[in-house]
Amino acid sequence: MSIIGITWNKSVLVSFEPSTGVITAKHAWLDPNQNFVGLAYDYGRNMLYALSQAPSLNLYSVNPLTRDVTLIGQLTINGDDVSGLAYDPLSGSLYTLILHLGTPLRTDLARVNPDNLQITVVGTMANVLGESLCWRDIDGQLNAYTLQGSGSWDSPYKASIVTIDPTTAAMTVVFETPYHTIMGLAKKPGENAYFSWVNWTSHFYADVDLNSQQITNLGNSDPVGVTSGAMISKTFYVAPAPNLPPCSFTDNECLGL
């Protein structure tokens, strides 16, 4: 099962295998001066959307066929940062999580209109920080990770995977993971399970099964470099980057890898 994601250090859109930790294709180079925390796919328009973290909070579109990257604009939020991006095919909206890092912690679930960047706060999840986001076609719900406190990778605060009602932001905990830093929800088609990235005593991708509440370690993530919520399952075609002008060097140099 291939995953498409954005590398953290140079913002390259790549395809990779989470089981082996190997990049299988390179597609496009987004803004290398930004770090991306969300990636979503609109299969009605055949368009990818990517969201960068604060202070920029820029929303981009990426055409999977032409690989054209377009800056849509900057989100205006009442909060400190954002995390995650999910596309709702029922309303044509994007969802993101707005983080409030003060005391007490809270996270707002918000809808984003990709055409005009209008933001509508659906509701608030109190006393938690939300990370990553994914739409579930099977029941029209959202999944995310939440934390009750920030900290380093070995923090005593462990992330829980939760289900969120997109109409009210009501949150239900599915189970608590053994990790503080676990991000990304690339849904496995036809399964109640995800691929995620884990920062623990090593860095690796993991299979997160919501039915069994088990997490299985997969490939080493260091050779890939996709280490945030900007990852989704590759269930659609994305053109590889050709080694053609204006790229006058190798693919690696052109794409910043």
Image (spheres, rainbow, N blue to C red):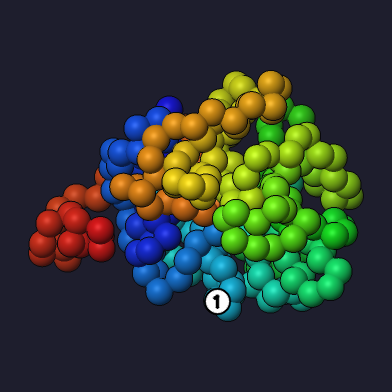
Pinpoint residue 236: horizontal percent, then vertical percent: 44, 35
Q: Quadrant of the C terminus?
A: bottom left
Point 68% across, 39% down: residue: 177
Whether 16 is drawn above or below 229: the answer is above
Residue located 47% across and 66% down the image? 35
Q: Nearer the viewer, residue 71 or 165?
A: 165
Which residue lies under the disc numbered 1? 56
Residue 108 sits in which quadrant? bottom right
> For this rendering, which residue is in front, 107 or 201?
201
Within 10 angstroms of label 1, few (less than 14), some, or many (20 or more) residues? some
Q: Mark yes or no: residue 121 visible.
A: no
Is residue 216 depicted above or below 247 in this figure? above
Residue 184, given in percent of the width and then of the height, sits at 56, 46
* Residue 154 percent location from the top left of the image: 60, 54
Q: Identify the secondary structure beneath mark 1.
A: loop
Total number of numbered discs in the rendering:
1
Residue at figure coordinates x 64%, y 26% from the top left: 214
* Residue 106, x across and y down, in percent: 82, 64
Q: Is residue 193 visible?
A: yes
Q: Amino acid at mark 1?
A: Ser
For this view, does 135 lie left or right of residue 125? left
**Is residue 5 shown above or below 124?**
above
- What quarter of the picture does the N terminus occupy? top left
Quarter location, residue 33: bottom left
